């Protein structure tokens, strides 16, 4: 996902592309989308889309990710499990000025009951996106 240094149009193009890909997933197929969304969905649960174990305060890009999830019904699975805060953040601002959870693992709502452990770390996201792209 483009960083906040990029204009919103580039981020919207990426969301449009993801929307098109999701349209091709049949109802009986599993859907797992993971990546560096450069979004903060925050600590407050939102409409069965995020759990109460997010991190930080929701930002504009976090709202956009919530909109995508509301449209297609995935859940941010790594916000459903309670981990210590030091295990939730996936990006550290230079000079340790802040730690943020910006990487998310999205999956269909009906898979939520089958999940046992879901964690997102920067290293795992990079590895997985390299494999799937």
Image (cartoon, helix red, strand yellow):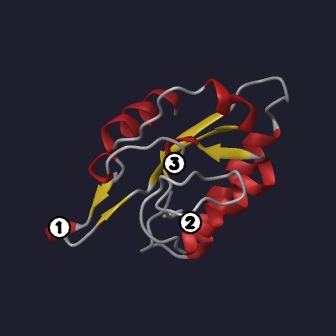
Residue wearing tag 2: 62
Dot 3 and dot 2 residues touching (CB under 8 Å): no
The image quarter containing residue 113 is top right
Q: What percent of the width, then of the height, locates residue 18?
A: 68, 48
Query: What's the residue at 82%, 41% (across, down)?
Result: 23
Q: Nearer the viewer, mark 3 or mark 1?
A: 3
The image quarter containing residue 121 is top left
Q: Nearer the viewer, mark 3 or mark 2?
A: 3
What is the secondary structure assignment of the residue under circle 2? Answer: helix
Residue wearing tag 3: 79
What is the secondary structure assignment of the residue under circle 1? Answer: helix
Query: What's the residue at 49%, 62% (across, down)?
Result: 43
What is the secondary structure assignment of the residue under circle 3? Answer: helix
Q: Earlier in the sequence, mark 1 or mark 2?
A: 2
Mark pair 3, 2: CA separation = 13 Å
Which class describes the residues within 10 Å of circle 3: few (<14), some (14-19), or many (20+)? many
Q: Is residue 21 left or right of residue 101?
A: right
* Residue 77, placed above or below residue 13: above
Q: What percent of the width, then of the height, locates residue 79?
A: 51, 48
Mark pair 3, 1: CA separation = 23 Å
Mark pair 1, 2: CA separation = 22 Å
Query: What's the residue at 78%, 48% (across, down)?
Result: 72
* Residue 129, placed above or below residue 28: below
* Residue 39, placed above or below residue 35: below
Q: Earlier in the sequence, mark 3 or mark 2?
A: 2
Q: What percent of the width, then of the height, locates residue 115?
A: 58, 27
**Residue 96, numbered circle:** 1
Q: What percent of the width, then of the height, locates residue 93?
A: 25, 66
* Residue 125, placed above or below residue 43: above
Dot 1 and dot 2 residues touching (CB under 8 Å): no
């Amino acid at each position: 996902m483009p960083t906040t240094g990029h204009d919103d149009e580039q981020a919207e193009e990426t969301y449009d592309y993801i929307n098109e890909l999701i349209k091709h997933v049949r109802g009986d197929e599993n859907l797992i989308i993971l990546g560096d969304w450069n979004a903060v969905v925050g600590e407050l649960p939102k409409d069965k889309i995020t759990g109460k174990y997010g991190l930080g305060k929701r930002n504009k890009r976090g709202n956009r990710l919530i909109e995508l999830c509301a449209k297609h019904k995935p859940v941010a699975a790594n916000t459903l499990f309670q981990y210590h805060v030091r295990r939730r953040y996936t990006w550290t601002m230079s000079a340790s000025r802040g730690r943020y959870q910006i990487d998310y693992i999205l999956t269909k709502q009906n898979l939520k009951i089958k999940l046992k452990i879901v964690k997102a770390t920067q290293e795992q996201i990079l590895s997985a996106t390299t494999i799937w792209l």
